[in-house]
Image (tube, grey):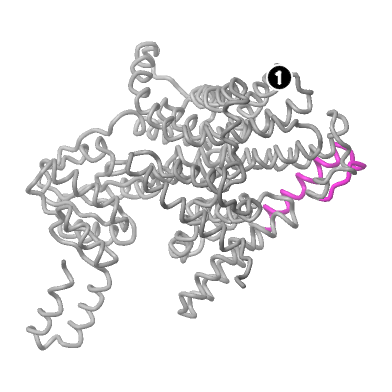
Amino acid sequence: MPHDTPLIATIVAGLGLAFVFGALANRFRIPPLVGYLIAGVLVGPNTPGFVADAGLANELAEIGVILLMFGVGLHFSLKDLLSVRAIAVPGAIVQIGFATALGAGLAWMLGWSMGAGLVFGLALSVASTVVLLRALQERRMIETERGRIAVGWLIVEDLAMVLALVLLPALAGVLGGQEQADAHASGLLSLPASYGIWGVVGITLAKVAAFVIVMLVVGRRVIPWILHYVAHTGSRELFRLAVLAIALGVAFGAAKLFGVSLALGAFFAGMIMSESEPSHRAAEESLPLRDAFSVLFFVSVGMLFDPFSLISNGWPILATLAIIVIGKSLAAFAIVVAFGYPIATALIISASLAQIGEFSFILAELGVGLKLLPEQGRDLILAGAILSIVLNPLMFLAIDWMKPWLERRAARTAPPVEAKPVGPATEPGQVASVAAAAKKEDGPPPKTTLTGHAILIGYGRVGGLVGSALKGAAMPFLVIEDADKTLAKLKTDSVETVAGNAANAEVFAAANPEGASRLILAIPNAFEAGQIVLRARAANPAINVIARAHSDAEVEHLKGLGADTVIMGEREIARGIVEEVLGSKPELRRETAEPSVA
């Protein structure tokens, strides 16, 4: 008799159908996450056939959220977070207040209570961690100024929602719901209503502050020490295990001991780990699991959705969607522009936040459990989340279309004198650097005057070594890179750069591929490298293309797209060893070296 294995069945059904529908979506040039959501609807309780375990799916999805935020923390630093506080803190607070007011207004029109309107509005005000990070990662914006603002905004929203989750049970009776003592959700942070509202607020803020202090004082010493110790054992298996244990352990401990969200705990763990040398390796080790579990997040969201609610709740769903996609976007756009940032940055931030997700579901469930929010409210929140997640990629396409028109309009109405930021955009004394970044981020980058040069894509560990060699040989070259820190260092070293993703047509055109002699792809992503190879071949059929790969399949892929030379790391290591051992036998050295360059 076969064993009952709901966990295995949920993972197999979720990932299997997500792959099928994700591949179909990609085939029709639709974002794969739409396919993941459809897979969730099909295995959910609201459609016939197999029904996966929704509770298990939600817990698996939480792991994806933890690993995603951990990965973001690895690319972040405390300095980056503090540098955007002047826009992220007031921006997030004003946007939460505006969206909450719009949600409360819709609730009033539907005849709900004040408490229901508050819960409903708060649920519509907070963006999904997974969707926002996926959008930024696809556009390679995590390490840009825009990405830092969006992530900082997200952190402030997370903190505000943690506070809301604590206060709602304490305020349930006042708002017309069920008293906390009788509510199932009362154990959220084990803070009884007898503490009073200000007591609960004070204890919550104290817990969050305690967590931050522990991470900055203790975690900053302990986590890097653990990683260094494990790295010196030479065991890749132990290192991978240590990375996962730290990410999941800190997130879980933060939630249980300090009442901080799992996502926020994971973010701080990654941020602390980023200060240690093995942080890049840690990011690579967590990447496969991070991608797999983030897919399960979208599947779990799809499982909650009842497609028939689109018929029974037509206009309320449209009104809810309008608040999320239009209301929140306009508020975020106005706030960012008011702080003196360029239109391009305001558009990216507003599109990133024009959706809702995991925190919205938690608030909805808590509101229903406290008898504050009617079940119709939960259905509207779920429908709004699904539709806003599906529409989010289209929002980014829309801003690409709107940006030139808005910039032309702004240029016509702008005063002749140079405008200065309305509010402090970053740390004191850094206004000039922000203005330079704003200028860089508005419109296509200027085209280089170099000819006969090499275009180096990526300036990480491999690209940095290649760039140093080119500079030492006095060969003309420029670098296409999208990481702000790397760009700043290259500028200091007097290396010409083009800021952005080389897969973007405007960015790549700025490097003058028509007049270049070589294209060197130092990035590890073979799929993205393949797109750049195709673009280079179309611009300059005679350009010499050199790329890197990690497997024979990647070598064949890049060669098939037009790369002249593809270097595979393992073969080059073998070649170096053989040259050392058989240096006196050049014929053997040639035989071994031939396959190293495919």
In this view, which residue lies farthest toward the right?
A: 194
Front-most of 218 and 403? 403
Q: Is residue 188 visible?
A: yes
Quadrant showing the N terminus: bottom right
**Relative height, residue 499 to residue 278 (above, below):** above
- Is 215 rendered above or below residue 336? below
Quarter containing the C terminus: bottom left
Measuring from the top left, give residue 309's x and y in whole percent. 61, 30
Q: Residue at x 65, y 40 (%)?
A: 361
Determine the main secondary structure of the stretch shown in magenta: helix
* Closer to the camera in the image, 264 or 24: 24
Q: Amino acid at mark 1?
A: Leu
Quadrant in which residue 24 is drawn: top left
Q: Is residue 585 positioned above or below 87 on the image?
A: below
Residue with the mark numbered 1:
110
Magenta residues (range): 190-214
Question: Horizontal and vertical percent for residue 199?
Answer: 86, 41
Image coordinates of residue 162 in percent, x first then y, are 71, 43
For image coordinates 46% across by 66% down, the residue present is 278
Q: Residue furthest front?
A: 1
| Residue 589 painted magenta | no
Describe residue 567's horizontal placement relative to residue 361 as left or right: left
Q: Quadrant of residue 127?
A: top right
Left or right, 373 with respect to 272, comes to right
Residue 102, horizontal then vertical, whole percent: 64, 21
- Mark 1 secondary-structure assignment: loop
